[in-house]
Image (spheres, helix red, strand yellow):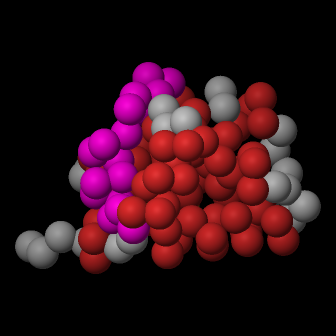
Amino acid sequence: MSEHRIFSMKFCSVYPLYVQKAERKGRTKTEVDQIISWLTGYSAAELQQQLDQGTDFRSFFNMAPAINPRIALIKGVVCGVRVEEVADPLMQKIRYLDKLIDELAKGKNMEKILR
């Protein structure tokens, strides 16, 4: 079976969509960055460096300084799939990020999003 195409997509091509989704709902780029930092351990400067380098999703998560140990507390459905049941570890991390951005856009407060 071939690997999913999102693994080789540039993170910088999807990042603006995360920000747009949040901003359409009255949230901010800063909050999106805070979620990404919580999940991956990237500082603001490190995140910007990943965006500037055009890093793909696989490398973005593989080079993450510290995946948050509370990641398993993220539960729910994204695109009709329960994030806690995604078999591929990389796809699961991508879905976790999608879920957190969805929660932000739905108006959940940051304390609950960041568990």
Residue at 64% across, 65% down: 18
- Asked if the magenta segment contains residue 110, the reply would be no
Name the residue nearer the viewer: 13 or 49. Answer: 49
Outermost residue toward the top in this view: 69
Left or right of 88 in this view: 38 = right
Span shown in magenta: 54-71
Residue drawn at 55 percent across, 36 percent down:
43
In the rendered image, the vertical position of residue 34 relative to residue 23, given as above or below: above
Whole-percent x, y for residue 86 in the image: 34, 52
> Which of these two is toward me, 12 or 21?
12
The quadrant in which the N terminus is found is bottom left
Residue 84 quadrant: top left
Q: Is residue 75 visible?
A: no
Residue 43 against residue 79 in the figure, above or below:
above
Residue 109, above or below 53: above
Q: For the point 75% across and 46% down, which residue is it?
A: 31
> Residue 88: image x %, image y %?
25, 52
In this view, the residue in front, 2 or 76, is 2
Magenta stretch: includes residue 69: yes
- In this rendering, does residue 52 appear at all? yes
**x, y percent for residue 103:** 71, 51
Q: How many marks?
A: 0
Residue drawn at point x = 35 percent, y = 73 percent? 9
Residue furthest to the right in view is 26
Corner quadrant of residue 65: top left
